[in-house]
Image (spheres, helix red, strand yellow):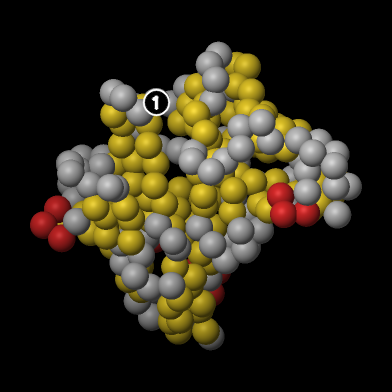
Amino acid sequence: GAVVSQHPSWVICKSGTSVKIECRSLDFQATTMFWYRQFPKQSLMLMATSNEGSKATYEQGVEKDKFLINHASLTLSTLTVTSAHPEDSSFYICSGDRGQGETQYFGPGTRLLVL
Amino acid sequence: AQSVTQPDIHITVSEGASLELRCNYSYGATPYLFWYVQSPGQGLQLLLKYFSGDTLVQGIKGFEAEFKRSQSSFNLRKPSVHWSDAAEYFCAVGFRTRVTGNQFYFGTGTSLTVIP
């Protein structure tokens, strides 16, 4: 159990366009969902934390107007990269937990390449 | 401030040899402790976790980890490494506060190379 999916798994887009990434918990209700960004050969950097039905909490230095997060239900969160630029190219990973600081279950990641 | 340290950026072991990956954390209380593994271009897979109780925890793929409160450590071990274990390993700590809710911190990762 505790499977998280992400869609798409990879995406290539032109500079200036917006890209939406979906994160779904398939067999559990994710009280909290997290979005991470990972650069090559580096650790995961937390971008934001979202609870269902409320606004996301962004980490310092992460532009909330650029990285729009919507957590509409206990099984779905979306990350929209608005007006993407080449420096936004990265590996984006989401995760969900059941609350109480419990285990985070990670999606397989979405690789974004902005040309 | 809370932190997670993985002192070894890269480790190379021979197939069949034993393995120990180090992890130290800095936090006022005992957090929840995790080890994840990431294969190239993939998401993270949970190997094992410690919440409370027995300080030696068993995980998947033959891994185990031992929590040592006195050393604030949670080292990952495997008695005999397989070539398929080559990957990036992340230690993580999680905890919950009334003010900030769930918090989760990752170490910088240890890259494991296995030579035949």
Q: How far across and down, in percent of the image, does residue B65 sit?
A: 29, 58
Residue drawn at point x = 53 percent, y = 85 percent: B116
Q: How far across and down, in percent of the image, does residue B113 sit?
A: 51, 77
SS of the residue under disc 1: loop
Q: Residues within 10 Å of mark 1 (few under 14, many from 20)?
A: some
Q: Nearer the viewer, residue A35 or A4?
A: A35
Q: Is residue B106 visible?
A: yes
Q: Farthest residue in the right direction?
A: A14
Circle count: 1
Q: Quadrant of residue B50?
A: top left
As drawn, A49 above or below A10: above
- According to the picture, the residue beneath numbered tag 1 turns out to be A99
Residue drawn at point x = 37 percent, y = 60 percent: B63
As drawn, A2 above or below B53: above
Say which chain tag 1 marks: A
As drawn, B82 above or below A18: below
Q: Quadrant of residue B14?
A: bottom left
Q: What amino acid is at disc 1?
A: Gly
Q: How far across and down, in percent of the image, does residue B9 sit?
A: 43, 72
Report the side of B38 relative to B13 (left or right).
right
Q: Quadrant of residue B39?
A: bottom right
Q: Nearer the viewer, residue B75 or A57?
A: A57
Q: Farthest residue in the top direction?
A: A53
Report the side of B25 relative to A107 (left or right).
left
Report the side of A92 relative to B91 (left or right).
right
Q: Is residue B50 visible?
A: no
Q: Nearer the viewer, residue B88 or A92?
A: A92
Residue drawn at point x = 64 percent, y = 46 percent: A92
Q: How far across and down, in percent of the image, does residue B60 sit?
A: 42, 53
